[in-house]
Amino acid sequence: MTMRIEMLVDTSKVFPLLIFRRNPYFQKRSRILKKWGFLGTGIGLPLIAVIICRNKAKVWKFIKNQLGLMNKHDRNIEAFLESQGPLGIKRYNFSDVKKMTNSFKVKLGEGGYGSVYKGKLPNGSSVAVKMLNDSKRNNGEEFVNEVASISKTSHVNVVTLVGFCLEGSRKALIYEFMPNGSLEKFVHKKADQSTPALSWDKLYQIAIGIAKGLEYLHKGCNTKIVHFDIKPHNILLDENYRPKISDFGLAKLGTKDESIMSMSYARGTVGYVAPEMCNKSFGGVSHKSDVYSYGMMLLEMVGGQKNANVEASRSSEIYFPQLVIYKKLEVGSDLGLDGVMSTEENELAKKMIMVGLWCIQTIPSQRPTISRVIDMLEGSMDSMEMPPKPTMSSPPRSTTDFSTASLSGDSC
């Protein structure tokens, strides 16, 4: 009796399973479930693999975060990018960057920031890929500045940032390709270069285009952007020689109503840096600092020579406009520029010089806004007053940029 009770108990435990196995309905449902199980595995696993491949950077970031492999610097960059919300530009994996550059086959240029390579996107569009040098101290900050500022812009005279790559120490910025390179090679032509000379009208149109790009950065964006490194090297030319402002690594973002910007260190390149960047007694740092750099560049465009001569023996010889042009304008003598110039070309050159001299006034309040610069360039010479003679102190005798120099002292 006892045994029978035990058997009944045991049977009751397996009874539902026996019914399930013997019932044709349940047998059919079992086969269906098995079939969909295998099918789900066949589809699901490859689908998961595809998702991981397409989001490799995010997956790797998650893994590194979980394992504590991401350093504080990288975490700060990632956190900042996430705080910006949708950037409107694509994030690429490093493997994508290698593929688009054909393993970095064609180098377009090189500088302290790193190297630039020619690349091609899957849709056939040509791009320029700037690989940031990991050994440079401000590498991370310049990367963040570039992505945060230029990704918010859209203007015909500002270069387009197509995308970026951030995989630990490997940082890349991907821009639209500019077939005519930088303005520098046209302004500072070397004897062995076959670069064609730009006409005065073309130089004039380039000057206006750069000014309009700066006006957009200062007034046209939701966020005011001050570039802090305007120079011929950072002006790129498309197939029609239309200028586009590039390299926002030293840029600073501010609010539209912010007139004076707080700075922890000097930014820019010797020969183009406004006096207030090095000496606070001249005034506060603002968008007028870009106007100063623009003015120095404009005078270089006219003179065809660098405005800072690091081998000059006296500080008065440092600046091209102080050395020759101002005195010639003052007495109304021939400008002495290279080449035979027509009356119209001479007027264009004279106008660009006058505007440039207004832009490089030592005191920021005496400089025009960039909007006023455009008005002067597009207006008549008859309505333009002779600018005061610029007086400025000599910059450091160095050809390197001093973007890390402290502003705590009185001068750079």
Image (cartoon, helix red, strand yellow):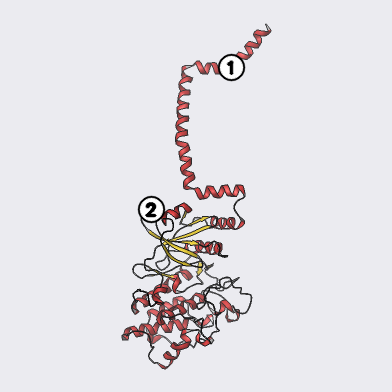
- Check if mark 1's residue and mark 2's residue have beta carbons within 8 Å: no
Q: Crowding at label 2, few (<14), some or many (≥20) Cα neighbours within 10 Å?
A: few
Which residue ends up furthest to the right in the rendered image?
2
**Which quadrant would the C terminus be assigned to in this image?**
bottom right
Q: Amino acid at mark 1?
A: Val
Q: Is residue 334 above or below residue 301?
A: below
User: Marks 1 and 2, Cα distance to the nearest angstrom?
Assistant: 61 Å
Query: Depth-wise, is mark 1 or mark 2 nearer the camera?
Result: 2
| Percent of width and height locating residue 167 | 52, 54
The relative height of residue 193 versus residue 78 in the rendered view (above or below) is below
Rendered view: 34 above or below 203: above
In front here: 216 or 280?
Answer: 280
| Res. 290 mark | none
Q: Residue at x 56, y 58 (%)?
A: 77
Disc nearer the start of the sequence (1/2) = 1
For badge 2, the amino acid type reads Pro
Identify residue for label 2: 122
Q: Residue furthest front?
A: 192
Determine crowd level at label 1: few under 14, some 14-19, many 20+ residues with C-alpha closer than 10 A. few
All told, the count of numbered labels is 2
